[in-house]
Image (spheres, rainbow, N blue to C red):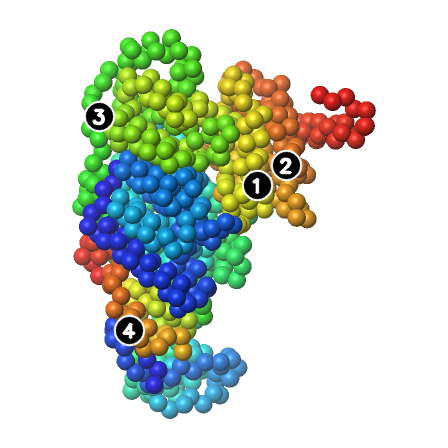
Amino acid sequence: MYKYDEYDQRTVDERVTQFADQTARYLAGELSDDEYRPLRRQNGLYIQRHAPMLRIAIPYGNLCPAQLRMLGHIARTYDRGYGHFSTRQNVQFNWPNLEDVPEILGLLATVQMHAIQTSGNCIRNVTTDPFAGVAADEHIDPRPWCEIVRQWSTSHPEFSFLPRKFKIAINGAVQDRAIIRVHDIGLDLVRGADGNTGFRVLVGGGLGRTPIIGEEICPFVPWQQILNYCEAILRVYNLHGRRDNLHKARIKILVKSLGVAEFARQVDAEFVHTRDGLSTLTQAEIDRVVDRFNDPALPELPAEDAGYAAQLAANKAFANWVKRNIRAHKAPGYVSVVLSLKKIGAAPGDISADQFDAVADLADQYAFGEVRSTHEQNLVLASVRQADLFALWETARSLGLATPNIGLLTDMIVCPGADFCALANAGSIPIANAIQDRFDDLDYLHDIGEIELNISGCMNACAHHHVGHIGVLGVDKGGEEWYQVMLGGDQGNQAVLGKVIGPSFAAAELPDVISTLINTYLDCRHEEERFIDTVHRVGIESFKTRVYVERDARLEGRKRPDAPSH
Amino acid sequence: MPQVIKNGRIQGDEWKVLRGVGNDAAATLAVPTGRVIVPLAVWQAQRSQLASSAEAGMLGVWLTGDTDLDALADDLMALPLIAVDFPRFTDGRGYSIATQLRTRYGYAGELRAIGDVLCDQFCFMIRCGFSTLQPREERYNLAQIDAALTRPDEFSGPFFRNRRGTR
């Protein structure tokens, strides 16, 4: 993965010094709450329900063992022994003391980590495909471009006080695994007619209160100009985005109100002046960044390992895990492994201090020291030999990291919800746990097959509920926690927003509602048809009707005093 | 005398910022003598009377975040001083206005940040091309401003550009 140079390190070190000074002045009463708030937010620090929450950046999801061990140390020393992976590929600690945060940041800086711009109205952590650089379907490696965007956006003087937060994602594969269409800027790496690298630029996507799928504003920006082009977009947004209403301040609202054609015209008018400007990229710059990635040299291997084939045939549990948790690698004889952070009974995305250390060991032993965090809140070992899979699986299983459920119903995306987050209207982890309990039979889960269930505790949509095949949204109704259910959303190349099926449900009803949706699918599906494809084929109406018919029957059953218990 | 930071140094300042003028009054308002920074509307309404003062280096104009620079730039370039107002320090439009004045229009005169100008944003302002920072009135004592300027020179150049030796 990318290794800092002296400029990277100095910037992070200086930010630690700066933040320690800012915090000291705040604690001494020299800075008001209002003055300190954006400063701490731009350093990942929220004031939350129980304590400050510190969100640490994992740029485009890349982690090395030393960083994982440091996160384990922080979890053990400053938190309650665990951390939480967010849907922006970052990691969050929920229990640090404000006074300890400068010290934590100092420790992070020693392993080339920081919390810069993980919050606040600025350019946030850039995200990409967790399989970047190794995916079989990748045409251009997005990581160097992500790193360049990280460097450019870090402490960008012009764009540190935008109307609202700003998220950029980059895709370089056939299948978009970075959901670029729901980002403020989505960059799609493409080849021009002459074979040169460039970017198809999407703008104005986002979830939250007003979910919108982004639209293309330029089919091809040459790589040399991509930062100049982004500066043109950001300048138009910074000057004209709404600042009078927090809920209408994202770029998507500006793009909608102007219309994408007019927005593109304004960007082009600005780009005339930023083109060939100070942020023009050169081949030397790209080479410098690419060199610092220092990817492991993977020894050449035969495409199929005989021992591996035998282990697959002999051990059904291993084969199940391989079927669900392995992804294709561009190099013969290698695969990528997804370590599941969705063990039944745990909070999705949570990881203990010991697991941090153990994943570091696994990466050292089996994966050339490369780990990725995913927006689906799991971890990826990017490059693993087929021959090592069985041993890796056995160890991962003993660590609780080998639940064979990637892409299945219990591999839910879940925000921290009201148990931790001050913004949430409703709990999300308890709902996830109740659904995990209901669907704890692995054979049944495998039979249901691929499905994405996303649960957000409020309309800020941290769990991307709009693009879940089933989306659950916590809402507040007269002080009580209720849940809206959406159906038909999807991420990826054909990203589409789900539709609310009807009136919301009480927490206790959700496992039954999910069961009804699953049963409807099982009754309607064609052979080999995924849940989402069935929903799109038959329409949400039949799912919806059955959910409310069965719900009414349950409520009716409860009212009758002589109703049989079962 | 109020203190400002000019080209990195604290110094006393004689400029008065004329505020609280509605557009209706812009044409009739009596502009005081001495060095004065007037709202854009006053400059536009009284340009003929004020031009000589501007030429003599005694008059500047302050802009708001919604100023349409494209329509005005030619008119503003000859001014000895342009100020950009930050109504709240979290309103970042001023950074783009300053950047445009310096890079797109090539403004070379004094560029001053006024309004809710706070120590913790000095570095961003300087990097966007402001040459003078006028901290919010009565917000800081001299020692605090001094401390702000002697802090480690974090991000003294744009991180990304600095590394490549430009600006």
Query: The residue marked by circle 2 belongs to what chain?
Result: A
Label 1: element kind: loop
Q: Which residue is mark 3?
A: A298
Query: The residue marked by circle 3 belongs to what chain?
Result: A
Query: The residue marked by circle 1 belongs to what chain?
Result: A
**Front residue (pair A52, A525):** A52
- Closest to the camera, between mark 3 and mark 4, is 4
> Mark 3 and 1 residues: CB-CB less than 8 Å, in contact?
no
Residue A159, image x, y percentages:
37, 58
Whichever of labels 3 and 1 marks the residue nearer the N terminus, that label is 3
Q: Kindly identify the amino acid type of the residue bearing the numbered disc 4.
A: Asp
Q: Kindly identify the amino acid type of the residue bearing the numbered disc 3.
A: Leu
A557 left or right, relative to A65: right
In which quadrant will I find the N terminus of chain A? top left
Q: Quadrant of residue A40?
A: bottom left
Q: Which residue is mark 1?
A: A427
Residue A510, image x, y percentages:
62, 32
Q: Which residue is mark 2?
A: A507
Q: Quadrant of residue B1?
A: bottom left
Q: Which mark is residue B146?
A: 4
Between the C-alphas of marks 3 and 4, the distance is 55 Å
Q: Kindly identify the amino acid type of the residue bearing the numbered disc 1.
A: Gly
